[in-house]
Image: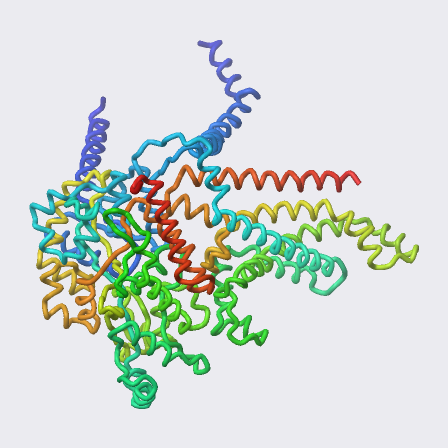
Amino acid sequence: MSTKLKGLLGGVVMSAMAVTAASAEDLVIFWAEWDPANFLQELVNEYEEETGVSVTVETTPWSDFQTKAFTEFNARGSAYDMIVGDSQWLGAASEGGHYVEMTDFFAKHNVGDVMAPATVKYYAEYPGNSGKFWSIPAEGDAVGWSYRTDWFEDPAEMKAFKAKYGYDLAPPATWAQLLDIAEFFHRPDEDRYGVAIYTDNSYDAMVMGVENAIFSYGAELGNFETYEVEGILNSPEAVQALEDYKKLYSYTPPGWAKTFFVENNQAITEGLAAMSMNYFAFFPALLNEATNPHAANTGFFANPAGPTGAQHAALGGQGISVVSYSDNQEESFAFLEWFIREDVQKRWAELGGYTAHAATLESEEFRQATPYNEAFYQTMFKVKDFWAVPEFAELLTAANQRLYPFIVGDEGTAQETLDALAADWAATFKKYGRTE
Amino acid sequence: MTHSEPRAGQSAARGLNDKSIRNLFIFPTIAFLIIFNIFPLLFSLYTSFTDFRASTNAPANWVGLENYSYLLTNEFIWRNFTITAKYVLISVTGQVVVGFGLAMLLNRYMPFKGLITTLLLLPMMLSMAVVGLFWKLLYDPNFGIINHSLGLGKFEWLANPDMALWAVAITDIWMWSPFVMLLSLAGLSAVPKHLYEAAEIDRAGTFYTFFRITLPLVAPILMIAIIFRTMEAFKTFDLAYILSSQPTTELIAIRLYKMAFLEWQTGLSSAFAYIVLVMVVGITMIYVKYLNKVKER
């Protein structure tokens, strides 16, 4: 072999080694395409500065997120080292063997106490109360409300409202007030409407919207430990909640039949509605004058209490998990150790991420940082979530098939709708052997 | 050495023989078909008899005909089939009426006929997703041009469960009538002119000429257009998915997608796909049989 050829081969081997060494230090986090993912990329750039390990946040549109993530899982692919997955995925991803268990990591780093309790319960633990953990709460989120402060503070409107309803016009503290205010501002002749709510039944949008009512009315989706739903999901409180959600639909702008976060923010930016339901993660856009001409007149409030005084909200947000098929699990855990540090969580919040870190959340600095952080802080200690079982998507489909015709199509009654849904869910749990 | 060199040269000049060339073309194609068509087809047939879920590491269990019986007795699946049948009927009928009508109009002298034909063909050249998003704006009750032009006020096309399917079908008719028009135009231009002249001499009326000359002669090519459009309408996904979220517009392709890729019920969705396949093949066979009859006349 000539010296020239030996040199060439040596160069190739050295290059291959260099590529291998570099790829071991490149971590990939998969998430949906939205602002928090951009904020996370900014944050992880600082990790690279500190450690030399580069981290890339790869994103895909929300509509494609679940399908793409599970396609990669099913293929046992190592394209992603970590994934910021939805809370509902916990059952499917943990039972399917796609997530690495983090129980030891939780114990070692005391994560259960460091993060807000509700976020640990819903983003990390599966099965419920099992003490087994699969994710680090990363992006806390919940459904809250935005509203037009200039409409609410208009003296003429305030006077007319007081005359009609007998109390002062202010951000609603109860669902009864929410309904009154929605009715009051609903003026189709003036192109002004009462409220914007979630109605899209493609995935979990409408169900999350309905959950806000159901949870605050003191009702539940079922017993998460025994999987019993009959008598719980179709309880009188849940029926009342669903009736009132439907009532809210009658105060929405025309064509409000396939709406989610984009449309609900548009309801405010286009001056259509007095109040709009949305995840807190989408509120930064409402304070940006470039995207919201009414930014100076936009306020925020937490999901109001129901008739019994119970006050809850549907959980959004995601936890960050290590993918079982990753070749860089050790490096991923090293990254997570850095990610849960208090100073990093503070920085995460500064950049715009919704931290689930309890101390950061409770700090005055965080609560005063934006007009919606206080409402977010209040909400994150009152959140409840959908079923996180592996068959969650089937439960969602059944819910969409039952709820949508009632809310949007005006078919049947709330009682009939929830009775039918309870029967569907009971059959699904039976099919998967969760009940007798 | 002196002998072998010319022989090698001859072989190179001859190149590959016919059999080798045939094999070179056929074997990769067969391998491709087996890997990407036959194997998935057989594998999905097998999974349709199991409770396999691609999202889990659990092994597939044989469940026999359980998936098929569940699907064929499920009220929501039947609703999806009914909606799809209604959609196919409205959409294909609309496309045939509009497409054939346009072809009749274009099958005569008119200025800028070529330009008009090209412009009429534009909708079918657009992407389904773009058309869906575009028509969503047109249907908007607040600022949509359709309500504005027709003076319908804030009429809700997509939010109204009874209207949503019609709205999707109208969009599909707008998009695909040009396809029917194109095929019909080809059929109409092939009708011998002397037949019309003979009919004129015999003082045959317009309707008589249409039903006795035009339609029978164009029928075979029109039938082909109907077969294509029925198959396409049967598997419509994107347009309905983008335009509406109503249960009244949940076509079988949408339900199948949700079952397979959101719920990850792989076994069940395979069975569903086979039921749809059998139905499409069955409908196509009926059409083809009718097409052959028409040709024989």
Q: Does residue A208 appear to the left or right of B100 in the view shown? A: left
In which image quadrant can residue A9 be found? top left
Q: Does residue B91 appear to the left or right of A385 in the view shown? A: right
Q: Is residue A246 above or below residue A96?
A: below
In which image quadrant can residue A301 be found? bottom left
Query: Residue shown at 30%/42% (left/top)?
Result: A435
Where, quadrant-wise, is the C terminus of chain B in this rendering? Answer: top right
- Image spot of residue A278 (x, y percent): 30, 66
Camera sees residue A342: yes
- Image spot of residue A10 (x, y percent): 19, 30
- Image spot of residue B259 (x, y percent): 41, 45
Q: Is residue A68 above or below residue A290?
A: above
The one nearer the camera, A233 or B204, is A233
Instruction: Please tell me how many numbered marks the rendered image carries.
Output: 0
Where, quadrant-wise, is the N terminus of chain B in this rendering? Answer: top left
The one nearer the camera, A363 or A2, is A363
Q: Does residue B106 appear to the left or right of A422 in the view shown? A: right
Q: Does residue A104 appear to the left or right of A233 in the view shown? A: left
Query: Residue shown at 62%/61% (left/top)?
Result: B119
The one nearer the camera, A216 or A253, is A216
Query: Residue shown at 23%/33% (left/top)?
Result: A12
Camera sees residue A332: no
- Image spot of residue A220 (x, y percent): 27, 58
